[in-house]
Amino acid sequence: MMLSSLGRSCSAHNVVHSIRASAIYSTHRRAMMSALSSQPQRLPEAHSSSNTKQPLKDSPPVVVPTAKSLSSEPASPQVAARPPPVPKAERPRPTIRSTKAVLSMTPTAIQRLRGLLNSPTPHLIRISVRNKGCAGLSYHLDYVERPEKFDEVVQQDGVKVLIDSKALFSIIGSEMDWKEDALSSKFVFNNPNIKDACGCGESFTVA
C-alpha cells in the first residue's frame, strides 16, 4: 500500500513538473517570437561577397563603332579644301586708234559741192573709180538719186557725198579739192595711195 501511494505521488509530481515546464517553454517561446517580430527583417544579399566582381585596373577604353565604320564600303579619302580663286589681273584695254578718214574735203570743194547739190532737183554725188587712161584708173563723179547697198557715206559741213564700195581701197585717206585756172576747173584728189600717175594727171595707179 505504501509503494502504491509513493508511486502515485511520484506520478503526480512528474505531471506537475511537466505542466510547469510546458508553461515556461510556452512563455519563453512567445517572448522570443515577440522579440523577433519587433526587429526589421533583413533581405538576403543578392550576391555573396565571394561573387563580387572587382573593378579592372588600367582597362582600355571601349570604342563604340559608328555607322560609318560598320559600313562595308571603303572610306572615301578626305579631299583638302580648295583655296579661293585668285582674282585675275585686269588686262589693259587696247587703245582704239583713230581710223583714217575715208575722204576729207577742203572748204573750196565743200563750197563747190554745195552749189551743185542745191539744185531744183535734189541729187547725191557718187564718187567711183574706173579703168581709164594710160595709168589704169581715173576718178568718176555721177549724180544719183539714192545710195547703193554698200556705198560709204561721207558728210562734212552739211555736204554729203557717196563713195562706191569698190573704190574705197583706192580713195581711202584722200583729200578732195576744187581747182580752177585759165584752162580748166575740176575736182582733184590728193591721194596718198597713188604709186604712179600719168603726165596729165587724169589717171593713176595705186600701190
Image (cartoon, rainbow, N blue to C red):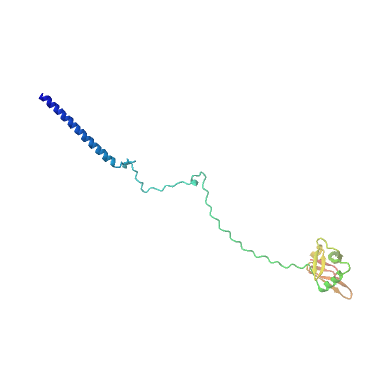
Residue at image point 49% right, 46% down: 67
- Can residue 136 be seen by looking at this rendering? no
- Front residue of 204/152: it is 152
Find residue 127 and report its horizontal and vertical position in percent.
Answer: 83, 66
- Front residue of 54/10: it is 10
Taking the image as shown, residue 76 lies to the left or right of residue 176, namely left
Taking the image as shown, residue 90 lies to the left or right of residue 169, namely left
- The N terminus: image quadrant: top left
Q: Quadrant of residue 202?
A: bottom right
| Identity of the residue furthest to the bottom in this view | 182
Taking the image as shown, residue 89 lies to the left or right of residue 206, namely left
Residue 122, placed above or below residue 25: below
- The C terminus: image quadrant: bottom right
| Identity of the residue furthest to the top in this view | 1
Residue at image point 82% right, 65% down: 162
- Front residue of 152/42: it is 42
- Can residue 110 be seen by looking at this rendering? yes
Find residue 95 and report its horizontal and vertical position in percent.
Answer: 69, 67
Residue 198, placed above or below residue 48: below
Taking the image as shown, residue 164 lies to the left or right of residue 4, namely right
| Identity of the residue furthest to the left in this view | 2
Q: Quadrant of residue 128?
A: bottom right
Q: How many marks?
A: 0
- Front residue of 19/133: it is 19
Residue at image point 16% right, 29% down: 12
Find residue 79 and report its horizontal and vertical position in percent.
Answer: 53, 52
Residue 14, placed above or below residue 111: above
